[in-house]
Image (cartoon, rainbow, N blue to C red):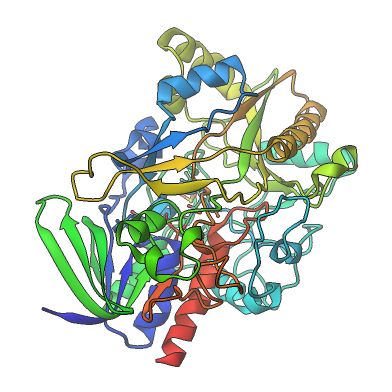
Amino acid sequence: MDRYDAIIIGSGFGGGGVAHQLVRAGWRVLMLERGERVERGDHNWEPDGSLDLTPFYSKETPYCVAEQIDKTASKLDKLMTRRTGATTVASCYCVGGPSVFYGAVSLRLRETDFHPDPVHGDSEADWPFGYDTLESHYCAAEALLDVAGEAGGDPTEPPRSAAYPQSPAPLSATSQMISGAADRLGLRPFRLPLAINYGAAEDRDACVGCTTCDTFACAIGAKNDVATRVLAPLLARGLELRPNTVVTRLVVDGDRVVAVEATDRQSGEPLRFEATHFVVSAGALATPHLLLASGLDQLNPGGDVVGRYLTRHCNAIAFGLFRRPVNPAREFHKQVALHDYYHGDERVASLGKLGGIQQLHSPPVGLVHQHLPPGLAHLVGALIVPRMTGLLVMAEDEPRYDNRVMLRKGAADEFGLPAAEIRHVYTERDLGARDALLVRAREVLTEAGALWCYSHYIHTFSHAAGTVRMGSDPSKSALDEYCRFRGVQNLRVVDASILPSGGGVNPSLTVAANALRVGEQLVAQS
Ligand SMILES: Cc1cc2nc3c(=O)[nH]c(=O)nc-3n(C[C@H](O)[C@H](O)[C@H](O)COP(=O)(O)OP(=O)(O)OC[C@H]3O[C@@H](n4cnc5c(N)ncnc54)[C@H](O)[C@@H]3O)c2cc1C
Ligand code: SF4
């Protein structure tokens, strides 16, 4: 049997970041990924190219969700939740992970995010380092993902030691409308940093500014996702990537992992791979699932926290309906954000830090058809969607001990992974923070000319984090400052599970930056 220097489980931001360091240092690395490659072409632009409607969004390993229902949801929202069966969570499995379908927003955590707000419950979240430790790795991650941004506009922006690698595209008419409305309200709109190729990279097509970006794979490869921008050059340098490989167990001998067991997703063949070092980066739901299924929590002095403190942000979208079309078929308008209420809002001071507000696209018509009854869907698709534009609110949620991924009684899945479930309840503060941001987002839309606003609550776990957190206290965290899994000599975790708290920004850039840091340390100490 081949023996590798390192095996990395999962090919998303964490896995890609670590692989970048190990492969470039000359290590022999095997990356095991349960999903398939996403082919690119005109089909990505079709309505059914949206993640939910593709085979890459799968419930083949279903996570049953207990206690998730948000009692404040509107009737329309509850109807949509019932139609999509949101009580069982699907996951995105493909080479590059959800980055292939993501919105490309690449924000750093703020300095304050490394010191959790005491108002955010008694999570005992304890970052083992501050923003300064990650700053150079944020620069490296922005370079790796070729982020386009504009420094200086974000009122909460942390210090940076390097300029953004690219400048952003000019503002579209709809973005100018939103930005102008925010200006008139005395706010400080700023440019969303995006991992999109606007032409600086010569070897790939530049972005053509379409409306099918967030939740779609880029048909021309202009989105700087992990598959396109990170893995492709590493494969040319010798990275061995095995798609369609579902890892089911880490095999331990004493205090070392000696092998991983897996199942070939297409043939069902059982597989086994050996290495000196192991890195788990399967995402914040699958990683604790795999660690618990392997019994590794038993070896860790903080093993009780494995699977706990699940955060996911408390997200919603305020949609505004306008008299005239604001959503032309080919106009990218996810460009502007507001952080004026990031650290709180005087109207609801007791809620502490709130989070961010970001522009986003109107839902693609294909998605509208999936979520609404047929007659209503045609009406909404033809008359309302072209006149809608939205603002996403992203509230930081409290890491709670009882919010968790855990094994459950029941049959294993077709690959041999034991059944798992999610328990998650938002606190009143989380919902209050989300609703306070929604009020502010609706004010901006109304100032921009919206005749009517509708709030849609987001129930997905697309920003799941925190389930194998790092920390200084071995009894309250499973990972040390270099994301070494305590109690096991040669095991690291690098995906969004590691985050002790999530801040109010999208997680991917922080996951990538930290994975680059951990990979650098792994090379240096070996
Ligand atoms: C539609 C959408 C839009 C988003 N937009 C943004 C955005 O604009 N900005 C942002 O910052 N974040 C965004 N996110 C969130 C972001 O994608 C995640 O936070 C990020 O991908 C987490 O990275 P990760 O390394 O933790 O895991 P992932 O990127 O989820 O990677 C985990 C990988 O492990 C694989 N895997 C899982 N189980 C196994 C197993 N048993 N064996 C082998 N492989 C396995 C998966 O297939 C996957 O490829 C978005 C997410 C979604 C779904
Ligand atoms: S907006 Fe640009 S990066 Fe996004 S899918 Fe369209 S072409 Fe690709």
Q: Is residue 218 visible?
A: no
On screen, 59 above or below 484?
A: above
Give how far across and how far down residue 290 sits, in percent. 33, 58
At horizontal 58% and vertical 37% (from top left) the residue drawn is 425
Number of marks in the rendered image: 0
Q: Nearer the viewer, residue 236 or 408?
A: 408
At horizontal 62% and vertical 54% (from top left) the residue drawn is 169
- Ligand 1's quadrant: bottom left
Left or right placement of residue 380 versus residue 49 in this view: right
Q: Quadrant of the N terminus?
A: bottom left
Q: Nearer the viewer, residue 203 or 474?
A: 474
Give how far across and how far down residue 292 sits, in percent. 36, 57
Left or right placement of residue 139 versus residue 330 in this view: right
Please tell me in which quadrant of the rendered image residue 357 appears: top right
On screen, 146 above or below 175?
A: below
Please tell me in which quadrant of the rendered image residue 17 appears: bottom left
At horizontal 57% and vertical 62% (from top left) the residue drawn is 499
Give how far across and how far down residue 354 sits, in percent. 75, 46
Q: Nearer the viewer, residue 180 or 514?
A: 514
Q: Quadrant of the C terminus?
A: bottom left
Left or right placement of residue 389 versus residue 60 in this view: right
Q: Nearer the viewer, residue 359 or 343?
A: 343
Left or right placement of residue 24 versus residue 452 in this view: left
Give how far across and how far down residue 342 sits, in percent. 77, 50
At horizontal 81% and vertical 48% (from top left) the residue drawn is 352
Q: Is residue 180 visible?
A: yes
